[in-house]
Image: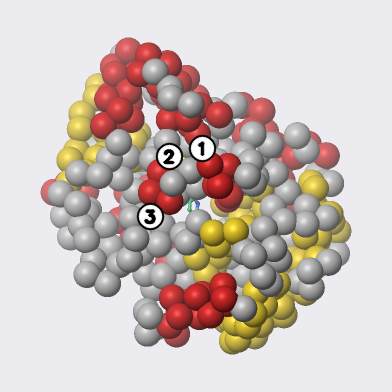
Amino acid sequence: MPVSDRELTQMFERVLTLSKVDKTQSVAVLKSDYSNPRIVRAAMDAAQRLGANVYGVELPAFNHPRAMGMDMTAYCGDTPLTGNLAAQRALEAADLIVDTMMLLHSPEQEQILKTGTRILLAVEPPEVLARILPTEEDKLRVNAAAERLKRARSIAVTSKAGCDFRATLGQYPTATEYGFADEPGRWDHWPSGFLFSWPDEGSAEGTLVLDVGDILLPFKTYVREKVTLEIEEGFIRRIHGGFEAEYLRDYMAYFKDPEVYGISHIGWGLQPRAQWTAMGLHDKNDGMCMDARAFYGNFLFSTGPNTEVGGSRKTPCHMDIPLRGCDILLDGEPVVLAGDVVAPEASKA
Ligand SMILES: O=c1ccc(O)c[nH]1
Ligand SMILES: [Fe+2]
C-alpha cells in the first residue's frame, strides 16, 4: 500500500530520533541519480524538524560494465563514492549519514565509520519501511542474541532438507542490524532485525541444501527444486541440483573469480514483522528485499566479500541466501530449532 509523504517524514523523525539526531547534530543525506526522491526529501525534512544541521551530498551514479541487474547488493565494492575523496571528506564531517544510494560492502563505508560518523542505510520501498519501523525492543532482542553469538566458538546448521554445515567462529566480530544508527561509528539498515558473523577463514565445512521456498538474493527467486552446495575449507566446491543450481553456477562463474565461492556473513533473522512471503509481492527492482534477510528464525548465509571486517576476499559478487526450517547451534546449544528462535530467551519475539 502507498505511504503518504507526511507519514514517511514522521517515520524518519522517529528513526532519526532513535539514531540520536537532535539540534547538536549534523546530518548528511547521501544520494545519487537512482535514489528514491521521496526518501531523500523525508530524510532532509525530518532531520531539519529535529533541529539538526542538514546537508545533501549528491554523487553521479556509477555503473560497472560487468554488473547485471539493478539490485545494489549484487555487485559490491565500487560505488559512486569510490575515488571521490572530497565527497568522502564532506561525508565524514557529518555525525550521521542517511545513505539513500548504498555504500554497503565498500571500503569507503568502513573508512567513514572509523571516523566515528554513523551511517543509516534507507533504500527499501516506503511500505516496507513502514511495516518494519524499528523499535527499541528490536534492539534489545538483537543485542541479546549478539551477546550469545559473540561468545560462540562454533556454529552448526542442520535441517530436514539435508543441511549439515559447521564453522568455527571468533576471528571476526559479531554484527547486528536493528534499524537505527545510535552509537558512534555504527552502521545500520532500516529495515532490518538480524545478526551475523563470519566463519573463521577456511573453517566453513559441510553441506547447505536450499530447499523449496528458500530464497536466492539478488535473484529474488524462491527455490523450486533443491540446490545442494558442498563446502570445503571455507569455499563452495560443488553446486548441484536442477535449474536453479545451473543458474547459480552460471551466474557465479561469470565473475571468473575464485573468491566468489567464499562463505561470507552467516547468522539468523529476528524480525517478526519481516515476512518470508513479502518478496513475492514486490517487483525485483523495488528494493533489495530485506524481508528475506530479516524474517524471524531464518538461517541467512552469504557468499563473496568479507573486506568490511578486515577479511582478504574482495570480490564484487555477493549472494544472500536465507533458509527456512534450520536448526542453528552455537557451541552445541540451539538458538534456532526448525526455523523458530528458541534462545536466548531475551531475543525471542
Ligand atoms: O542489511 C543488509 C543488506 C545486505 C547485506 O548483504 C547485509 N545486510
Ligand atoms: Fe549480505
Q: Judge from the rendering whether residue 333 lies leftward or rightward of residue 43; answer left or right.
A: right
Q: Is residue 124 left or right of residue 278?
A: left
Q: Which residue is mark 1?
A: 191
Of badges 2 and 1, the one in the foreground is 2
Residue at x 56% of width, y 47% of height: 280
Q: Residue at x 72, y 80 (%)?
A: 206
Residue placed under numbered mark 3 in the picture: 71
**N-term mark: 2 or 3:** 3
Mark 2 to mark 3 CA distance (whole Å): 11 Å
For the point 26% across and 57% down, the residue is: 79
Side (left or right) of 190 relative to 263? left
Please, what is the three-letter code of the amino acid marked with disc 3? Answer: Asp
Q: Earlier in the sequence, mark 1 or mark 3?
A: 3
User: Which residue, given by chain and number where applicable, does mark 2 sit on?
Assistant: 124
Vertical position of residue 283 compared to residue 173: above or below: above
Residue 292 appearing in the image: yes
| Residue 188 placement, left or right of 9 | right
Q: Considering the numbered disc 3 on the image, is that residue within a helix, a strand or a loop?
A: loop
Residues at marks 2 and 1 touching, judged by CB atoms closer than 8 Å? yes
Disc 2 from disc 1: Cα separation: 8 Å
